[in-house]
Amino acid sequence: MSDTPVRPGRPSVRRLPSAVRGLPSAVRGLPSAVRGLPSAVRGLPSASALRLSRPSDTWFKPALSVVVASAVPHLTLLAIGRLDLIVYTMAGSLCALYGHGLPYARRARAVAGVVLGMAAGLAVSLVTASLTGSTAVLIAVGALLAAVQKVLCDATRIGPPGHVIFTFVSSAALFAPQHLGRIPGHLALTLGAGAFAWLVALAPALVRREGPERRAVARALEAAAVCAEDPGPRTRNAADPGPRGDNATGPASRHRNAAAAAVHAAWQCLLASGRPTPVRRSLERLVVHAEAAFVAPGPGMGAADPERLRAWAALTRGRGPVPTPPSAPGTADELYGIDAERAVLRAREGRRAARRALLRRLGPGSPLLPVAVRTLIGCALAGYLCAALGVGRPYWAIVTAASLYQANLTLSWNRTLQRTLGNLLGVLVFAAVLPVSRISPLALVCCCLFFGFAAEALITRNYWLGSVAVTPMALLVLEFGGAHPAGELIGDRVVDTVLGAATGFLAATLVTNRRAAGRVEQALDATGRARAAAERTVADPAAAPTERDRARRALTASLVELREAGDTAAGEWWQRALPEQRLLAAEQAGHRTLAATAPRRGPAAHAPSIGAE
């Protein structure tokens, strides 16, 4: 496809390929390979957006965590007769939803940051609510907070659930009566509940210290097994591209891309896990074998046995000892390289580089800026429209609009359908359960805890299914401050949902994200540099093993970023056509360069056995 601009008036919208299932929160939504698509406009998906998928392999962890983190504050307030304060403790308890895909060393810092961010957003809302009763000002502050929270969550890549929980808490607090003198006490409740949520999130480390790393490595092994089963045409070398279109698309390419993303995620998880332990050493050796399955999938090039990889994955995911595979040639060099890279990341210069990367994602040229503008405009329009129509709770419309904004317009459209359907079904569930919740305060608390668990248990199947449980929970929270007419609550929620979804998606279509295409160009350049560096190290007999392995991992990371940038831009409107042939060629050449590194490591010396550690 040429790089000529799309003709004005014809938005180029493409469907985002299916996400890699089962990956941790940091890479769960990474798209599959960028495909060569025609420039014709494609309709926005509808049925596919509502289709149920397999649940996440860790769905029960956030579900159980949020129930435990909420039950103790809820029951404590019930015992002292102050259920009206639950909104403040709930703000801290909801922090237990974050960080479940991270190793515990990083999770401790991430969840602590979430608690502080939640308290900061709540403080702004409470102070604003105590100083003014102007609905116009409150809506403006709510929209601004939603935009800031969206950008910060996307830049730090914290999530799921991302910015929606922050926006829900801060927007609700804006429209609650408040006095300046009570704010310190309310914030203390939030921080206290947040500290307890932090303990809940880290408690599994006491019984399974390497749990997140084991799951990440198991996913990499499973993805590598799929890649080893269908390697596609045999790759020649980095300098011989083969016939036109060879290995560019199709199942084999998608499997290789999925394996690359999973292996990259596993390395990142191990790098962030802290000091090496015997278990982590075994996990690193397993990732080396998983990596060989996608960098050299052809026969005679170090190809792995799919059944052996799956057996390792099952043992790694289980509670028993981690399997200890034999070291393939080059494994010692690989692990030495990992240690060197870990030391660099933990050094002062490594931390400075990480901060500079974060600042670049937040800088003036960031592709996140158009999404922030969308969030600001959409939330403000939704709130002001609901206020103009006399709806009593415009913050529901603000939260609905804020929840729609995803990486691109196609994903935002999917979320619009999911949110609308889930909320409308959720109000029916609320109508059915409301009489039960009013039996006693304890029944109300139990209903909220049940829906909190159900929301996290169902949301990984599809967002709309989780929304069916989130909606009654959000409505029941209002009951802690006193009973409200059921018809009023249901009517307001329906109106807010429809108006928030409509105005939110309208803002998404009007505020274009032309920087998405620029991000693709930057990713292409970065991939080219990474590939050139990897080829130099492969061709240089004097290159240090650590340099070669670091170059290979850098190339893998650049390919993951390239696919994410390409699929993000493919779902946007009103921008120049994507250089799809360049994307495919860069991805294909990158995988061939990765394959060229395999002979340096060579196949395993003998058939590995599955042994206990």
Image (tube, helix red, strand yellow):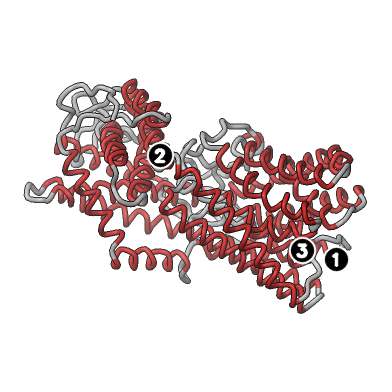
Q: Is 152 drawn above or below residue 413 in the view shown?
A: below
Q: Secondary structure at mark 1?
A: helix
On screen, residue 325 versus residue 154, left or right, reads left
Residue at mark 3 to residue at mark 2: CA–CA distance = 41 Å
Q: Is residue 447 visible?
A: yes
| Spot occupied by residue 545 in the image (x, y as percentages of width and height) | 14, 47
Which residue is pictured at 70% across the width and 62% down the height? 379
Residue 390 appears in which quarter of the rendering? Answer: bottom right
Which residue is pictured at 41% across the width and 43% down the height? 209
Q: Secondary structure at mark 2?
A: helix
| Spot occupied by residue 366 in the image (x, y as percentages of width and height) | 47, 65
Q: Is 383 drawn above or below residue 400 in the view shown?
A: below
Residue at mark 1 to residue at mark 3: CA–CA distance = 9 Å
Residue at the left extreme, as displayed: 542
Residue at the bottom extreme, as displayed: 131
For the C terminus, give its image quadrant. Answer: top left
Residue at the front extreme, as displayed: 80
**Residue ID for mark 1:** 388
Per the rendering, the mark at residue 197 is none
At label 3, which amino acid type do we have? Answer: Gly
- Are the two marked residues, 1 and 2, in contact with CB atoms closer than 8 angstroms? no
Per the rendering, the mark at residue 216 is 2
Residue at mark 1 to residue at mark 2: CA–CA distance = 49 Å
| Spot occupied by residue 348 in the image (x, y as percentages of width and height) | 30, 67
Which residue is pictured at 45% across the width and 44% down the height? 206
At label 1, which amino acid type do we have? Answer: Ala
Which label's residue is closer to the chain start, 3 or 2? 2
Residue 224 appears in which quarter of the rendering? Answer: top left
Tell which of 244 and 199 is nearer to you: 199
Tell which of 510 and 418 is nearer to you: 418
**Residue ID for mark 3:** 383
Which label's residue is closer to the chain start, 1 or 3? 3
